[in-house]
Image (cartoon, helix red, strand yellow):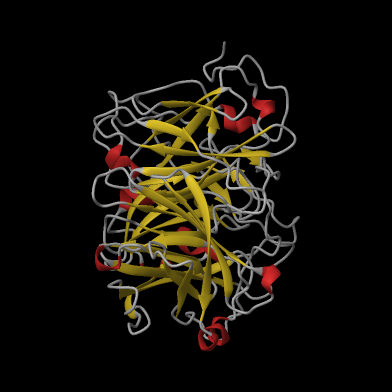
């Protein structure tokens, strides 16, 4: 049997790359938070984090986490001893994560039987994996509308909450709130209403990008974020059958006349950190006239942060966003972190002239660090749509320094969609002694293609100067409903 636990791959919606995970556990000294890949690898290896359960069809299933220090990306694996990779309709995915609890979705069989599991890290005790009661055919649970609320009392209690616009009611501001209570192990439905005057300012497409959970005095409050516009807050612990919603607009874009389109999390992120709601926006400057069939040349990029206090549900409307830090790629000096810059690809133009790497890399997916102030992670590629190599950049936006660089295997992504998320699960994982991983190899020399060539291709020189063609295919993209208009260019 192969190291992944499977003798062969019979072909399915699961990418071949998903059978070859980057197993490189760092051992017991886990980071306070990690960057965690959304999509699972199908692999039979285990460690001290492995937890077992059964699917609805009676198949044994395990989940294992492999944490590493950021900016390297941690991963998780799923394994069913009596199923083949082709029995999975797609890679299992993380829908939500909060503290020591992770909500997973597994799709088995061609009839798309969605199954939901809760993985709960045990700390010094064994972790657990629990199959949840299905929410029902009319309840839509996915990663953009589902969130987790964790009890702070140490009693193991958690709530899953999903907010969906009630299209059938035809009433503006009317939402259905689906709640799973771990104490009763039952799903319930409540009506959530947004006041008419707030609905007029909401202008939401009802497409949420992320769910956040507030703590402290605002415990019980969750926020459904439309990263194009604003946040819908709700006190999900309120016992009433009908609960109010509160709308808070996001800060205005860096460029006021910027047209908001495409997948918003490509250049925005939001998180609750140390009692504050923090928000970051990335603006990419594209060289005029360089956009051809999805390819483009960047001239620079700028990232800015804002924050506001998260006190109580009633006070959310009264607060305001306070500007934080702002940095451009051109302001980040190589002199401050020369070793990190050496790990990046070396870009040259058609005449062989070296180009400024940070300004020219296609950069997207800002992700706020959950444990270090002013640290933002970014995904970067030489070409947005082409190639399977990507890099994670750790940038201190206050001190304008590049804190770290790590490679990311982009074979399972489309562009830079569906890459990874920040999670604090690593604080609660009991790890065995470290399994040593692959060392980061030095950056390769890459040519920025002329637009006279086929758009999206890139000439690459390896370390010996030999020329080769960048793979132009996006290999192994998982089955998902993708927003085709995913680029938001200036």
Residue 286: horizontal and vertical position, in percent? 59, 71
Say whether residue 361 is visible: no
Task: From the viewer's side, name the closer residue of 354 and 44.
Answer: 44
Residue 290: horizontal and vertical position, in percent? 67, 69
Residue at the spot x=34%, y=69% of the render? 277
Left or right: residue 344 compared with residue 19: left
Q: How many marks?
A: 0
Task: From the viewer's side, name the closer residue of 124 and 176.
Answer: 176
Residue at the spot x=70%, y=45% of the render? 472
Specify the quadrant that holds the N terminus. top right
The image shows residue 315, relative to residue 296, as above or below, that is below
Task: From the viewer's side, name the closer residue of 117 and 192.
Answer: 192
Residue at the top extreme of this rendering: 1
Quadrant in the rendering for residue 370: bottom left
Residue at the spot x=56%, y=14% of the render? 2
The image shows residue 351, relative to residue 156, as above or below, that is below
Residue at the spot x=55%, y=17% of the render? 5
Say whether residue 416 is visible: yes
The image shows residue 282, relative to residue 27, as above or below, that is below
Residue 320: horizontal and vertical position, in percent? 34, 83
């Amino acid at each position: 049997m192969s190291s992944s636990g499977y003798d062969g791959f019979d072909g399915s919606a699961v990418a071949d790359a998903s059978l070859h995970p980057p197993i490189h556990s760092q051992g017991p000294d886990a980071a306070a938070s990690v960057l965690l890949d959304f999509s699972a690898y199908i692999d039979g290896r285990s460690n001290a984090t492995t937890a077992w359960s059964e699917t609805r069809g009676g198949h044994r299933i395990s989940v294992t986490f492999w944490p590493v220090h950021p900016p390297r990306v941690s991963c998780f694996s799923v394994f069913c001893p009596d199923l083949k990779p082709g029995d999975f309709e797609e890679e299992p995915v993380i829908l939500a994560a909060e503290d020591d609890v992770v909500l997973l979705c597994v799709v088995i069989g061609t009839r798309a039987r969605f199954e939901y599991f809760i993985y709960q890290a045990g700390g010094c005790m064994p972790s657990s994996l629990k199959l949840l009661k299905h929410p029902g055919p009319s309840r839509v649970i996915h990663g953009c509308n589902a969130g987790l609320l964790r009890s702070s009392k140490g009693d193991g209690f958690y709530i899953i909450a999903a907010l969906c616009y009630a299209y059938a009611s035809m009433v503006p501001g009317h939402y259905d709130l689906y709640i799973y209570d771990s104490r009763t192990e039952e799903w319930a439905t409540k009506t959530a209403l947004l006041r008419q005057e707030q609905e007029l300012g909401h202008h939401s497409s009802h497409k949420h990008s992320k769910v956040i959970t507030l703590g402290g005095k605002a415990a019980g409050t969750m926020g459904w974020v439309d990263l194009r516009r604003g946040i819908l807050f709700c006190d999900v612990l309120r016992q009433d059958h009908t609960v109010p919603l509160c709308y808070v607009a996001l800060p205005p874009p860096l460029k006021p006349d910027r047209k908001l389109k495409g997948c918003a999390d490509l250049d925005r992120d939001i998180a609750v950190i140390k009692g504050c709601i923090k928000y970051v926006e990335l603006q990419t400057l594209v060289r005029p006239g360089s956009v051809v069939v999805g390819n483009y040349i960047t001239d620079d990029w700028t990232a800015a942060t804002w924050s506001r206090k998260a006190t109580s549900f009633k006070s959310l409307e009264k607060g305001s966003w306070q500007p934080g830090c702002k940095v451009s790629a051109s302001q980040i000096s190589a002199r401050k972190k020369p070793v990190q810059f050496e790990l990046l690809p070396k870009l040259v133009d058609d005449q062989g002239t070296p180009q400024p790497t940070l300004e020219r890399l296609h950069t997207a997916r800002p992700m706020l660090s959950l444990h270090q102030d002013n640290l933002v992670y970014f995904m970067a590629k030489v070409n947005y749509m082409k190639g399977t190599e990507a890099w994670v950049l750790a940038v201190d936006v206050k001190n304008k320094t590049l804190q770290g660089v790590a490679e990311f295997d982009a074979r399972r992504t489309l562009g830079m969609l569906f890459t990874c998320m920040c999670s604090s699960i690593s604080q609660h994982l009991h790890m065995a002694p470290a399994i040593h991983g692959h060392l980061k190899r030095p950056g390769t020399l890459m040519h920025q293609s002329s637009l006279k060539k086929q758009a999206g291709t890139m000439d690459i020189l390896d370390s010996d100067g030999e020329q080769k063609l960048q793979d132009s295919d996006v290999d192994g993209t998982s089955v998902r409903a993708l927003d085709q208009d995913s680029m938001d260019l200036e």
